[in-house]
Image: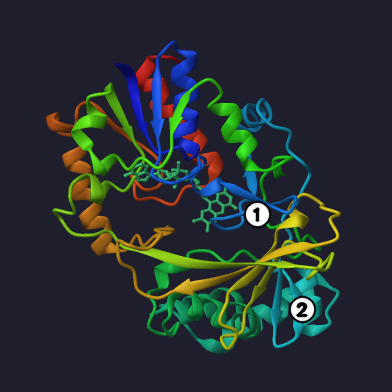
Amino acid sequence: MYDYLIVGSGLFGAVFAYLAKQNNKTCLIIDKRAHAGGNVYCENIEGINVHKYGAHIFHTNEKWIWDFVNGFVEMNNYVNSPLALYKGQLFNLPFNMNTFYQLWGVIDPNEAQRIIADQIKDLNITYPRNLEEQALSMVGVDVYEKLIKGYTEKQWGRSAKELPSFIIKRLPLRFTYNNNYFNDKFQGIPVGGYNRLIEGLTRDIEIKLDCDYFADRPYYNGLARKVVFTGKIDEFYDYQFGELEYRSLTFRDELLPIANFQGNAVVNYTEYEVPYTRIIEHKHFEFGTQPHTVITREYPVQGYNKAMEPYYPVNDDRNNGIYNQYKSLSKQEASANVIFGGRLAEYKYYDMHQIIASAFKKAQTEFAIS
Ligand SMILES: Cc1cc2nc3c(=O)[nH]c(=O)nc-3n(C[C@H](O)[C@H](O)[C@H](O)COP(=O)(O)OP(=O)(O)OC[C@H]3O[C@@H](n4cnc5c(N)ncnc54)[C@H](O)[C@@H]3O)c2cc1C
């Protein structure tokens, strides 16, 4: 009999298991996939760590989270500076003075600010009625048309005029020459890949792979006093209030016999006509010097059904309403021995540092530690 059965070996499950062990509790982790690590898992292809479930860049403002991660794996000094390719023209992201120079040839930040303000003023949008108007009223026509419109419409499979404005809450503009995508103090990629972090967290903890909790729920429940569930909450409750919707993606990897394909880890393709949204060249996350390279094209998937890989929750009113019903059930007596945590059980987009903080919070309550 274990103290905890942890369903899911992703970052939430791994951090919770580590903290449980620190508190002298025994854990068994199960995962339905053939590997541990959840979505941060890397597959080593010819010496290159390929981020199998999408590019993952660790960043945080919290020193304690950075120190925690560095206790298991050395982090390199990778800084995420994506590029955008639009009809053969290359732009720096996030939108900053380099982008504005590439768009208009301006070198004076005040001039760039004036161009954007003039474009916004001419549009006369007081109450944005859809995503297009929302974005236009924040960045003006040129940035929107070249760098946002096609990318967003591909992602969602719909015209930006038909998309709700709440999808884009903020579009930060920087009037400095700074291509660093994140504002956080700490940023990097684990040297040797994310699997090392998961291995460090779960050292001496038993993990059983290829085990779906729902294949034999009574059996798995019987193995431990409590369950930490990091899978989909709607599946846990047999979809009784309906299915929660996700945005899914397809990744197509390619091993190429050349040393360098695009000179940068992340290049977004912002025109609608290119079917993928971005190309990731994984070796650049770790400054690889191999004579070959692996690239991944990322394709949006339209529609969602529960057989697909759930990536991004779609937190609109309908889905949030359904989630709240599941959440109420999770607070009732019948679920007293289950702890729900992580992105799928909480139906919430979490970055990795937020998942770590959330696992700490749950563990602190559970083990009554400060
Ligand atoms: C495309 C993409 C890119 C991202 N990029 C970044 C980034 O750059 N930086 C960043 O900080 N964060 C990023 N994230 C977020 C990051 O992936 C999450 O914060 C983190 O992986 C969540 O960990 P988790 O343990 O909650 O979930 P997961 O990693 O999904 O782990 C859940 C695990 O539970 C298992 N499981 C589910 N159901 C069952 C079951 N029935 N039985 C057994 N096992 C089960 C799954 O197989 C999985 O292994 C990105 C997310 C996506 C989707």
Q: Secondary structure at mark 1?
A: strand
Question: In the visual, does 201 lie left or right of 234?
Answer: right
Q: Amino acid at mark 1?
A: Val
Q: Is mark 2 within 8 Å of ligand 1?
A: no
Q: Is residue 7 above or below residue 88?
A: above
For label 1, the residue is 50
Q: Amino acid at mark 2?
A: Leu
Residue drawn at x 73%, y 54% is 46
For the residue pair 114 and 82, the one nearer the viewer reads as 82
For the residue pair 176 and 65, the one nearer the viewer reads as 65
Q: Is residue 85 above or below residue 70?
A: below
Looking at the rendered image, the quarter that the N terminus falls into is: top left
Q: Position of residue 131 (x, y in %)?
A: 44, 77
* Crowding near the residue tagged with mark 1, few <14, some 14–19, many ≥20 C-alpha atoms within 10 Å: many
Question: In the visual, does 6 lie left or right of 116?
Answer: left
Q: Locate residue 353: give its quadrant.
A: top right
**Going from the N terminus, do you reach mark 2 or mark 1 first?**
1
Residue drawn at x 24%, y 51% is 234
For the residue pair 245 and 290, the one nearer the viewer reads as 290
Label of residue 177 in the image: none
Q: Secondary structure at mark 2?
A: strand
For label 2, the residue is 90
Q: Is residue 180 visible?
A: yes
Question: In the visual, does 346 lie left or right of 80?
Answer: left
Q: Locate residue 340: give its quadrant.
A: top left
